[in-house]
């Protein structure tokens, strides 16, 4: 059960415009993330705008994006993010069920992902678990990505560390 109350049209009719904005950008629903975040409407709308940019405006492939998100969620024990992304995004973005299962193991079996993808996984692991990245790991990823993509990858990892940790702290409920 969530540690703070969810906001909706009934509990906060004064936020109807903000709630309409969230619904319009989130599959027509007021999903639990925003039900919690709307306790601070300005943060909720800024959060949504930021995550929309991080998820949809970056130049990384959708497949890599979802790999990153699942890997961060694994390390931060975010069942909510894992469930939402497996249900709504991963398969459509080119990740099979077996690949998702592999990403959700601490040690990924060899031969499932290519060199670029494994270098990204190492980068995610280090940045998430150590809050820094060794030069060798950075260089391995940089061999495959542009400067823009390196910035976007790093911000994506940071954003989902923020996302998963806030949702964990607030004990967000699963989507219905």
Image (spheres, rainbow, N blue to C red):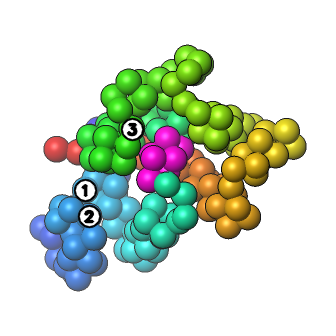
* Residue ranking furthest to the right: 135
Instruction: From the image, state whether disc 3 or disc 2 is nearer to you.
Output: 3
- Distance between the Cα atoms at labels 1 and 2? 7 Å
Q: From the image, which quarter does the N terminus lie in?
A: top left
Q: From the image, which quarter does the C terminus lie in?
A: top left
Q: Is mark 1 on a helix, strand or loop?
A: loop
Q: How many labels does the image show?
A: 3
Residue 82 location, quadrant:
top left
> Circle 3 sits on which residue?
95
Q: Give the range drawn in magenta.
A: 62-68
Whether residues under marks 1 and 2 lie with C-beta atoms below 8 angstroms apart, the answer is: yes
Instruction: From the image, state whether disc 1 or disc 2 is nearer to you.
Output: 2
- Residue at horizontal 44 percent and vertical 53 percent from the top: 62
| Horizontal side of residue 143 vs 135, given as left or right | left
In this rendered view, identify the residue nearer to me: 101 or 23. Answer: 101
> Circle 1 sits on which residue?
31
> Circle 2 sits on which residue?
26
Residue 160 place in picture, x, y as percent: 52, 50
The question of residue 64 being in magenta is answered with yes
The dominant secondary structure in magenta is: helix
Whether residues under marks 3 and 2 lie with C-beta atoms below 8 angstroms apart, the answer is: no
Q: Is mark 2 on a helix, strand or loop?
A: loop
In this rendered view, identify the residue nearer to me: 163 or 57. Answer: 57
Please determine whether, in this image, residue 161 is positioned above or below residue 24: above
- Residue at horizontal 55 percent and vertical 17 percent from the top: 109
**First in sequence: mark 3 or mark 1?**
1
- Distance between the Cα atoms at labels 3 and 1? 24 Å
Instruction: From the image, state whether disc 3 or disc 1 is nearer to you.
Output: 3
Residue 140 location, quadrant:
top right
Asked whether residue 127 appears in the rendered view, the answer is yes
- Residue at horizontal 64 percent and vertical 61 percent from the top: 149
């Amino acid at each position: 059960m969530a540690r703070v109350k969810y906001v909706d049209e009934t509990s906060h009719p004064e936020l109807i415009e903000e709630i309409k904005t969230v619904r319009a950008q989130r599959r027509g629903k007021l999903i639990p993330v925003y039900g919690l975040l709307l306790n601070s409407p300005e943060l909720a709308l800024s959060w949504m705008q930021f995550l929309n940019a991080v998820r949809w405006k970056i130049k990384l492939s959708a497949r890599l994006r979802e790999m990153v998100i699942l890997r961060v969620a694994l390390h931060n024990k975010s069942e909510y993010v894992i469930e939402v992304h497996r249900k709504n995004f991963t398969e459509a973005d080119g990740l099979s069920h077996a690949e998702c299962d592999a990403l959700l193991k601490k040690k990924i079996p060899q031969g499932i992902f290519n060199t670029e993808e494994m270098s990204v996984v190492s980068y995610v692991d280090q940045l998430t678990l150590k809050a820094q990245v060794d030069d060798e790991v950075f260089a391995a990823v940089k061999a495959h990505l542009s400067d823009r993509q390196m910035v976007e990858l790093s911000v994506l990892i940071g954003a989902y560390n923020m996302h998963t940790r806030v949702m964990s702290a607030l004990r967000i409920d699963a989507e219905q």
